[in-house]
Image (cartoon, helix red, strand yellow):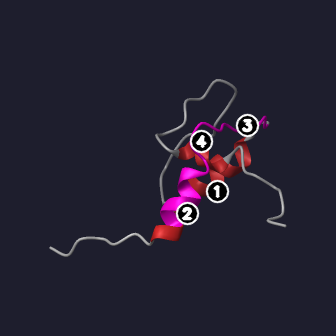
Amino acid sequence: MELMRIEPQTITHLQEWLGKTESFQDAVTAAPVRALSATLNRDDPPPSKGTFLPELWHWLYFLSARTSI
């Protein structure tokens, strides 16, 4: 098994994030859940207020809309 090599500049960039936090607010709507369910060919019931999301589906929300400049 080959070991993964991480470049020093990548380590330096990642270390700049240590101790920092970000906070986002978002409205959790049904459309992204319905879309991902369809993409994954799942037969999920229509989501409603209080519906629990499958693990990692929160990544559909709280997306950064900032430019990189």
Tell me where the magenta segment starts and ends, as one range. 10-26
Q: Is residue 61 left or right of residue 55?
A: right
Q: Few, some or many C-alpha atoms within 10 Å of disc 2 (few <14, some 14-19, many ≥20)?
A: few
Q: Position of residue 35 (x, y in %)?
A: 64, 56
Q: Nearer the viewer, mark 1 or mark 3?
A: 3
N-terminal of the pair, mark 1 or mark 3, is 3
At mark 1, the secondary structure is helix
Q: Amino acid at mark 4?
A: His
Residue underneath mark 4: 58
Which residue is at 56% across, 42% downward?
18
At mark 2, the secondary structure is helix
N-terminal of the pair, mark 3 or mark 2, is 3
Q: Nearer the viewer, mark 4 or mark 1?
A: 4
Label of residue 39 in the image? 2
Decide which of 52, 15 is in the foreground and name it.
15
Q: Few, some or many C-alpha atoms within 10 Å of disc 3 (few <14, some 14-19, many ≥20)?
A: few
